Amino acid sequence: MAAPIFFCLQLLCFAFTVIRTRAQPPGTWELLVQNAGIASMHTAVTRWNTVVLIDRTDIGASNLSLPNGVCRIDPNDLALTTDCYAHSALLDLETNTIRPLMILTDTWCSSGHFLPDGTLLHSGGWNDGNTKFRTFTPCINTSACDWEELPNTTSLYQGRWYATNQILPDGSIIIVGGIGISSVEYYPPKPGGAINFPFLANAGDNEGDNMYPYVHLLPQGNLFIFANNQSVLYDYVNNTIVLDFPQLEGGPRSYPSAGSSAMLALEGNYSTATIIICGGAQYDAFNNQSVNSTAKGSCGRIVATDPNPVWEMEEMPLVRIMGDMVMLPTGDILIINGAQAGSQGYGLATNPCLNPVLYQPDQPEGSRFMTLNPGSIPRLYHSTANLLPDGRVLLAGSNTHYYYTFDWDFPTELRIEAFSPEYLAADNVNLRPVVTKTPKTVQYGNLYNVYVTVLSPILEDCEVEVNFASAPFATHSFSQGQRLVKLGVTRVVSQVNGDYRIVFQAPPNGMVAPPGYYMMFVVNQGVPSVARWVQLTS
């Protein structure tokens, strides 16, 4: 077995040599849509390879008209009671075309998550939308689906603005926090109204840095909830706080001083969950309207499943406020978008952070960050980043002004682009698997086959992974519901003509991976396939 292992090591060493000696940092950029018509502050990728784009509805005209003379009539709208412009749209990733969608009530700073059947649940917002639930059921015929606003009999008990959604193992959704709200509630709604949840009320300071809390479902079933610089382990079944984590040093980390957060890939026996939180604004930058206050460059990393957890501190190569963390199919994290000074809010940031950064969690401390090829479009307040099934990352939005404004610094951004990490480089094409057959539905704990072809042989001791990536709801520098689960690969069987059968085991339960649709990637020596959508069920 020594020769195959040595060959794998040779390939890896060669890859690192290429990275370190190339003239240009890794990664490439491409413009997908010159004018999407709306600046997407909320973005989600559907199982039909379309992308839902959502902006707020109460600031007047967008640059995208509703079709066929249709208009939205809303006497509570703050700008246009009769509004013939779209504030949501659907991007078709195959054609890069835009179709306007109709949302009735205000979606400013709302939240969202996909239900187990692939329907996007959208909750809350501002003004007449703050107690509303809306659904978007994606369809293969993209002209046949649109938003549906649920009746008042199915609504939030409290108005949720700047809240966070997370799916639970039973497929229900928990909605956490929001401006002025220290509680949680659920979809479908539970009798008795909102459950008391005092932690969020104590997390804020005089600028309220406890909005859009970071919420992660841990593989033991409890929730890690973080706001400002505090975090708890929350047992939502019994409505109790199991553990108070140590405070994260360095000041506030959530809105309006937000960096970003992600849970590292779940793997092995799924007993360990590690959370990382990076960046943010200096304390009081929002209150002082300080656009030149340098952002933070520190990161905290904590093993949330450890009985005695502590924060491990690291420094990013660049300071960043409003950065988005995107879990890549490999388990690395892309940190992208944002600014190097100021805070969140209209007109409160400057010095765009154009260089993405790759965080490689398996590398030793001090060697985990790599600065990547810079983009050219500033993406500040109300921008988003989402993983696509082909392994690229979609970038949308940025509006630092109350209305759509195009003649100031950092104008409203209607362009949509994609960033390709280095694993999509041409010199990796021989390693990239092509999935030829896979199950459409998998059940917890069962074994399944996925078939791939690869130009270069898969050697026995080289690493092949089958990974499930969720499709999160990205907004305000946090991807709600984001997770990557590395599945157990039990066998890799060589067929003929570069074909392989890979035997993998589905996640063991809904705590490790809640029910729903996932992008299933086959990763060969760090190079992912194009994903196939797979539904995980009990």
Image (cartoon, rainbow, N blue to C red):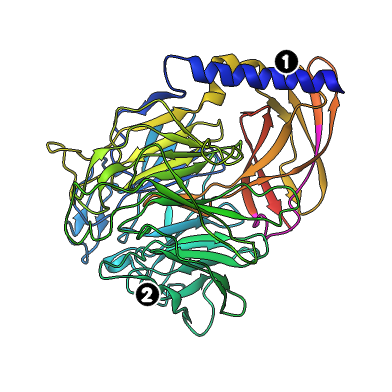
Callout 1 touching callout 2 (CB < 8 Å): no
Prevalent SS, magenta region: loop
- Identity, as a three-letter code, of the amino acid under mark 1: Ser
Measure the alpha-carbon separation of dots 1 and 2.
Answer: 55 Å
User: Which quadrant does the N terminus fall into?
Assistant: top right
Count of picture labels: 2
Q: Residue at x 42, y 41 (%)?
A: 316
Residue at far bottom of view: 192
Is 310 colored magenta in this rendering? Answer: no
Q: Secondary structure at mark 1?
A: loop
Q: Residues within 10 Å of mark 2 (few under 14, many from 20)?
A: many
Q: Which residue is mark 1?
A: 456
- Identity, as a three-letter code, of the amino acid under mark 2: Ile
Pick the residue in front: 16 or 168.
16
Pick the residue in front: 177 or 210.
210
Pick the residue in front: 157 or 508.
508
Q: Residue at x 55, y 40 (%)?
A: 48
Residue 12's spot in the image, x, y percent?
Answer: 65, 22
Position of 130 relative to 477 (above/below)? below
- Magenta stretch in the rendered image: 502-515
Location of residue 522 by image quarter: top right
Is 511 colored magenta in this rendering? Answer: yes
Q: Which residue is mark 2?
A: 181
